[in-house]
Amino acid sequence: MSEAALITGEDGLARPSWAGSDALMREYYDTEWGMPIRDEQGLYERICLEGFQAGLSWATILRKRPAFRNAFADFDPDAVALFTEDDVERLMLDPGIVRNRAKINAAITNAKATIALRREGGLVEFVWFFQPPETPAPASFAEIPSTSPESVALSKALRRKGFAFVGPTTMFALMEAVGIIDTHLVGSHRRGSSGVWPLTQV
């Protein structure tokens, strides 16, 4: 393992370097990242935010999350699906969010697609169907892939259902973030904390 892969904090807990210094990222890592999200609104929000993150740092998105929630009706799919072109223009003038027209339109498109999926069991069942039989057990960042067969399949499946900004890399990041896989580094104090995977696999 790289010496910089894990950092032991003042509290004696080992975390990856990306979560070891910034207080907001550390709080996110310790309390949210990798924990199961199994509600429609929460999963829709994460899909949108992962899409907005493309090409940017997650720290940027995390700092803007309160503004995103305010701008997108707390990511209520029923509310966002009703957004009009006037709303898009309003959002393009909002300095608190990422002002990217394609990504804003994708959030509206994805709200409508989320609602449509309710006829087939819903977004949560659809996304969690792609949970793999095993989870990675990375000892270093180099061992964490950027995609997987499951993230490629999920990306294709969501696109067929009308979702946008759901590429394989973005969907792999989603699967990490919402607990579908556990890519906490071996040795991290958060490894196996989601309860999704048997301890024998983590």
Image (tube, rainbow, N blue to C red):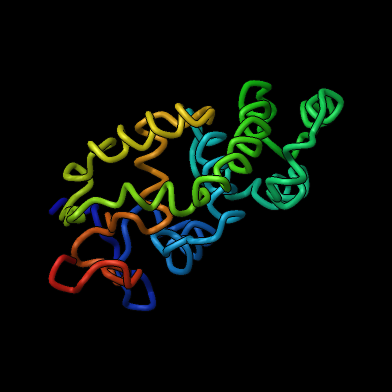
Residue 100, given in percent of the width and then of the height, sits at 65, 24
In the rendered structure, the answer to whether residue 95 lies left or right of residue 42 reads right
Q: Residue at x 30, y 52 (%)?
A: 131
Quarter of the image for residue 193 reads bottom left
Give the quarter of the figure containing the N terminus. bottom left
Residue 34, given in percent of the width and then of the height, sits at 39, 60
Residue 147, given in percent of the width and then of the height, sits at 27, 35
Q: Nearer the viewer, residue 147 or 128?
A: 128
In the rendered structure, the answer to whether residue 23 lies left or right of residue 83 reads left
Q: Examine the rendered structure and indicate whether residue 83 appears above or below residue 60.
A: above
Q: Residue at x 16, y 45 (%)?
A: 143
Give the quarter of the figure containing the C terminus. bottom left
Q: Residue at x 24, y 38 (%)?
A: 148
Q: Nearer the viewer, residue 157 or 56?
A: 157
Q: Nearer the viewer, residue 26 or 145?
A: 145
Please, which residue is most extreme toward the front here? 119
Q: Residue at x 67, y 26 (%)?
A: 105
Quarter of the image for residue 169 reads top left
Q: How many marks?
A: 0
Quarter of the image for residue 116 reads top right
Residue 54, given in percent of the width and then of the height, sits at 49, 31
